[in-house]
Amino acid sequence: METVSYLDPNQINFIRDAGGLISVKINDQVYHEVSVHRTFPRKHPFKYISIRDINKQELGLIHDLADLDQSSEQMIKQELQIRYLIPKVRKILSIKQEPGLWTLEFLTDRGKIEFYIRNVHDHIKADRNGRIMIKEHDNRQVYIENLNELDKKSIRLFRKIL
């Protein structure tokens, strides 16, 4: 049985880089591109938060986000919202380009969604783990966990805009 390692909230600091990725400094060690996970998403959405490194190895648990500094708490809450509330793309139904506007139609885990974006480079961001965030001008978002896990037609459609 593995032991649970709780992180001291006074010894950790979260930083978001220019690309939107999160790093954490624990004592004097910096871990880049960390991910945050709820261990009890319904019962304790802001307690017992697992912090994992780029290789998905757990660095430790945060007992309660309220114990963190305000900046770190807000950053982690925002990241949890992305992970747990933003629709996940299951299939790309269509992508159309008109002058100055792209129309993207997705099938997500929450149903069909249509997005309108003007500049692909400003609204589509990918991290090294393959997760792609797509943000519409009014801040609606969807994400693709891993493009290569989508069906071939979806991959082909998405590559048109990359």
Image (spheres, grey):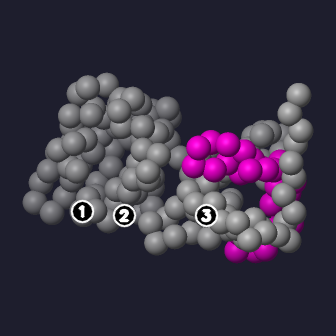
Query: Residue at the location (39% across, 53% down)?
Result: 126
Give the residues drawn in magenta, as a range: 48-74
Badge 3 marks a residue whose secondary structure is strand
Left-right relation of 151 to 59: left
Whether residues under marks 1 and 2 lie with C-beta atoms below 8 angstroms apart, the answer is yes
Amino acid identity at mark 2: His
Above or below residue 121? Residue 152 is above
- Gap in angstroms between the C-alphas marked 3 and 1: 30 Å
Decide which of tag 1 and tag 2 comes sooner along the chain. Answer: 1
Q: Residues within 10 Å of mark 3 (few under 14, many from 20)?
A: some
Within 10 Å of disc 1 (Cα), the crowding (few <14, some 14-19, many 20+) is: some
* Residue 11 makes an appearance in the image: yes
In front here: 109 or 46? 46
Magenta stretch containing residue 57, yes or no? yes
Q: Is residue 65 above or below residue 70?
A: above
For residue 29, the mark is none
Nearer the viewer's eye, disc 3 or disc 2? 3
* x then y, percent, for residue 10: 85, 71
Q: Are marks 3 and 2 in contact (CB under 8 Å)?
A: no
- The front one of 19 and 157 is 19
Q: Is residue 118 above or below residue 56?
A: below
Q: Which residue is mark 3?
A: 23
Sooner in the amino-acid sequence: mark 3 or mark 2:
3
